[in-house]
Amino acid sequence: MATRRIADEPAYVLHSYDWSESSLILEAFTRHHGRVVLVAKGAKKPTSNFRPVLLPLQPLRVAYSVTGGGQGEIHPLRGAEWAGGHVMPTGDALLSGLYLNELLLRLLAREDPYAALFDVYAGVVRVLGSGEHGDALEPVLRAFELLLLRELGLLPALDAETATLGPLAPDAPYTLVAEGGLRAATSGDRAALHGAQWGALQHALEPGTAYTTLLRAVAPVAAELKPQLRALLQYHCGSPLLRTRQLMMDLQVL
């Protein structure tokens, strides 16, 4: 079988787990090849060059080999270097980054490229690591969730009722539900936004719009968006509950 080499590929480690006494299996998110599975042989050895590099939420440049078609296979990692730029996030920013990693693991199909989503993810991780998010952590997460759902085709149009395709009344409340899309809110709904607010989000999600524009649209409604987006994401992720969400809930109780 023909073997080709992928070199100097921007990547992030989403998750790793043991494979034999000295090696690791990595779930990695790459810019040009999407989510790939790599085996880092000898990475657990004290003398391995991989050992201090293969960490989550750190920008990497990786090289690996692909044999034959390569689709869905485990590829041997040939090289990995830290691309620099920021340190590991801590505290709430670390938990938020791990939450994003879990979303990507649960929702992205293997080896489907999402270059635009990769660039947004890299920007968000950079903000988390720099500590520059301040009080804007919730809008940053909500904006990423919206973009992720849009890129995967799981987000309905936000400027019309999903069932009727009718336009939204600017001052009327609407809620986003997992099985029905965007519909008129009822008294039993946990959260809702006015039609004008949904329309502003739809406009900010148009292709080519800067991420900062989306952040500005999300910031005033982040609290109301959170339960709606979390329910939609959990619906598409399936059970069990996202581990990082459960950890955040447990920490809040403590």
Image: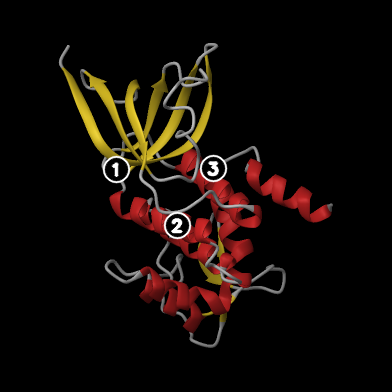
Q: Which mark is residue 113?
A: 1
In percent of width and height, residue 83 lies at 35, 45
In percent of width and height, residue 209 lies at 31, 71
In the displayed structure, does residue 210 sit left or right of residue 160? left
| Residue 202 visible to the viewer | no
**Quarter containing the N terminus:** top left
Instruction: In the displayed orientation, state which residue is furthest to the left.
Output: 2
| Residue 209 visible to the viewer | yes
**Mark 2, residues whose alpha carbon is within 10 Å: few (<14), some, or many (≥20)?**
many
Mark 3 or mark 1, which has the lower sequence index?
A: 3
Mark 2 or mark 1, which has the lower sequence index?
A: 1
- As shown in the figure, which amino acid type bears the numbered disc 1? Pro
In the displayed structure, does residue 4 sit left or right of residue 166? left
Residue beneath disc 2: 126
Badge 1 marks a residue whose secondary structure is loop
Determine the image quadrant of residue 231: bottom right
Q: Residue at x 39, y 76 (%)?
A: 213
Measured in 3D between alpha carbons, the distance from the residue under mark 2 to the one under mark 1, in whole angstroms, is: 21 Å
Disc 3 and disc 1 in contact, CB within 8 angstroms: no
In percent of width and height, residue 181 lies at 50, 61
Badge 2 marks a residue whose secondary structure is helix
Q: Nearer the viewer, mark 2 or mark 1?
A: 2
Q: Which residue is drawn at 48% across and 61% down?
A: 127
Colour scheme of the rendered structure: secondary structure
Q: Which residue is drawn at 84% across and 52% down?
A: 254
In percent of width and height, residue 35 lies at 37, 37
- As shown in the figure, which amino acid type bears the numbered disc 3? Glu
